[in-house]
Image (cartoon, rainbow, N blue to C red):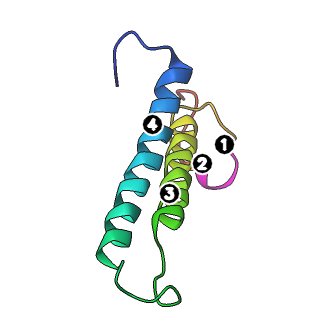
């Protein structure tokens, strides 16, 4: 991703990017729906921030599983961890 960063910093950057993307989408949605009553507005900054954070964490988990670093049972088993 960015050369020279520690592995943990690269992972944190990926998760943070998901969080920031969700926050920006939620901010835009909240701005667009600002004239509606409070009970009619749904899925704003908090909701999309949490969804973005969840997406970043899920992507991190999928990346670890693909590289053979995670639990290889179940769905991750389709990715071989050692050459045959």
Quickly name the residue at label 3. Answer: 49
The residue drawn where x is 50% and y is 47% is 56
The residue drawn where x is 45% and y is 89% is 37
Q: Is residue 17 left or right of residue 53?
A: left
Q: Earlier in the sequence, mark 1 or mark 3?
A: 3
Q: Earlier in the sequence, mark 4 or mark 3?
A: 4
- For the residue pair 1 and 45, the one nearer the viewer reads as 45
The answer to whether residue 27 is above or below residue 39 is above
Quickly name the residue at label 1. Answer: 72
Residue at mark 1 to residue at mark 3: CA–CA distance: 29 Å
Q: Earlier in the sequence, mark 4 or mark 1?
A: 4
| Mark carried by residue 14 | 4
Q: Secondary structure at mark 4?
A: helix
Q: Earlier in the sequence, mark 4 or mark 2?
A: 4
Residue at mark 4 to residue at mark 3: CA–CA distance: 14 Å
* Mark 4 burial class by Cα count in 10 Å: few <14, some 14-19, many 20+: some
């Amino acid at each position: 991703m960015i050369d020279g960063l520690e592995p943990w910093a690269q992972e944190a950057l990926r998760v943070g990017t998901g969080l920031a993307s969700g926050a920006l989408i939620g901010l835009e949605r909240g701005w667009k729906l600002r004239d509606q009553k409070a009970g009619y507005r749904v899925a704003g900054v908090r909701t999309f921030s949490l969804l973005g954070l969840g997406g970043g964490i899920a992507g991190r988990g999928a990346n670890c599983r693909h590289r053979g670093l995670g639990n290889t049972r179940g769905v991750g088993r389709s990715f071989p961890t050692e050459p045959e």
